Image (cartoon, rainbow, N blue to C red):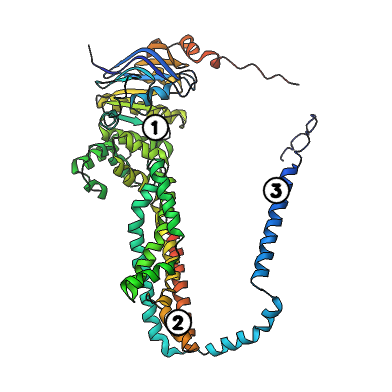
Amino acid sequence: MTSKVRATSHPVPAPPEQSLTATLRRATGMIALAVAIAWAWHGTGFELGRLASSLGPLTEFLGRMTPPDLSALEVAWRSTAETLQIAVLGTFLAVVLSIPPALLAAANLTPAWIHQPIRWVLALMRGIPLLLLALMFVAALGLGPVPGVLAIAVHSIGMLAKFYADAFESARPGPIEALDSAGANWLQRVRYGVLTQVAPDLARDTLFRFELNLRESLVLGLVGAGGIGFYIQLYIRSFQYTRVATLTLVILVIVVLVEQGSVAIRHRLR
Amino acid sequence: MSESVLRLRDLRVCYGSRPPVLDVQALEIDAGEIVCLIGPSGAGKTTLLRLANGYVRAESGELEVLGSRFRFGLDDSNKQRDQTIRQRIGFVFQGFNVVERASVFNNVLWGSLGRQRGLGVLLSRFPESDQRLAMGAIAEVDLLEQATRRVDTLSGGQQQRVGVARVIVQQPDLVLADEPVSSLDPVLAAEIVELLVEVARRHGATLIMSLHLPALAQRFASRVIGLRSGGVVWDGDAQALDDIAIAAIYGSETSLPAPESGR
């Protein structure tokens, strides 16, 4: 039998009162959120009635996509392979290009006057849209997958380098100090003290970025930077919706497969 | 007369404007000594050890470590001291500070990093001689069976053995140990302290360790230094350390607490 905690004979102090400022703050937050939603609803002309009436055209459009034209399968696989290649090579280049700035952006590896400005630059880089980069590289290098690879690589650095830097910062300082006390230099401490500790985090971040890159590189073809997006755009413009359907299905299969694979790999990382 | 390994003169360490955490008029430790620092928390044990390997700077005074002299407060000529001297000073940490995802062998081998030059070492290419040294050290701390296992699969006592083996591979002249056994149970603690003393004797290194249990100091050290409020309040043969001395070092903290008054 478990004994019950004996009731105390001391007078029980009153629980803390809800402070007025906390209540006000919460109310202000709720009102601000409601205003933002109303503003967006009104501004976009979002009407439930119009949505219901557009159900007809929508189903008609879907009807025009069926049955998927399997003669487009060959094009679908070939261009999907190109999209995958863009994502793989773009991610690889991004990893290589992200490591140096990431090392410099980690607060436990460099002084503030180095890591702060680098972090600002990375934040700026995250703000550049992928399609803008792709357009720039297509203008400079012409059509094809190469500008796509470069766009993906440059676009990824802002995020990947920040994630890597955060991972470096999560390394326990003790082991790094131990290597320092054994006389290890900066590079040796980074290699054995930091990288060894955070390797699984780096792998996870890289996989995540690869998944994003795969999905983002699907649209690169819209601006002529290679991959399956080019054909989607081509078939839509020439009203070959049954072919669009085939391409969409292939994309679905690839994205699901890659996600499953990356979940399986992530499970193994520790 | 043997040569001194560590010498302090009129040394003061302050953090901010509070009273000094370390204030030592004169202290000298000779080569080959096995010294224990004891004293209550905040007495300056850790500060003294970290001062010796350059992690802490003094406000004023003179410090001589392994033949290199540093004058504090006058000029800032101590900036270069760190890596060259530090390589000759092994440090055993309270929290073990091993790289948990790495194997026992790698952790121990990395004790040799201070000697490694060039970029090959960044690709895990270590000289054959250092690899052999690492295996020897692992044997010395009795972890041969665990040599290829990841350190995070080991117990606390075994992890500290890895820390000791890493220091063996470093081949230091001076070994500093900051509360190396405070997170271990008493039996394991005694084992690790004994191991540290054996290792220091066998390799001809001087050992200075801080311990929270005076009994361990009495049992294993040759000399005990009692610190209190940053000053040396006791310094002598471990055999001479009696209950009166311990009470003096720890102050009223060792006296029995008064029974709690009921209501």
| Closer to us: A3 or A249 | A249
Residue A209 in the image: x percent, y percent? 43, 62
Up-down relation of residue A32 to residue B54 (above or below): below
Assign the C terminus of chain B to one quadrant of the image: top right
Residue B241 image position (x, y, % from top left): 42, 12
Q: Where does residue A43 sit, x and y in percent of width and height?
A: 65, 69
**Residues at discs 3 and 1 both on one chain:** no
Contact (CB < 8 A) between labels 1 and 2?
Answer: no
Chain letter for the residue marked with disc 3 in the picture: A
Assign the N terminus of chain B to one quadrant of the image.
top left
Amino acid carrying label 1: it is Phe
Find residue B191 and report its image quarter: top left
Three-letter amino acid code of the residue under disc 3: Arg
Subunit of mark 2?
A
**Residue A25 marker:** 3
In this figure, which residue is indicated by the disc labeled 2? A233
Identify the secondary structure beneath mark 3: helix
Give the alpha-carbon distance from disc 3 to disc 1, as whole Å: 47 Å
For label 3, count other residues whose C-alpha is less than 10 Å away and answer few (under 14), some (14-19) or many (20+): few
Task: From this view, report whether residue B143 is shown above or below residue A85.
Answer: above
Q: Mark 1 points at which residue?
A: B93
Q: In this view, does B227 lie above or below B50?
A: above
**Could you tell me how far apart the alpha carbons at marks 1 and 2 are, in whole angstroms?**
63 Å
Q: Which of A237 and B147 is in front in this view?
A: A237
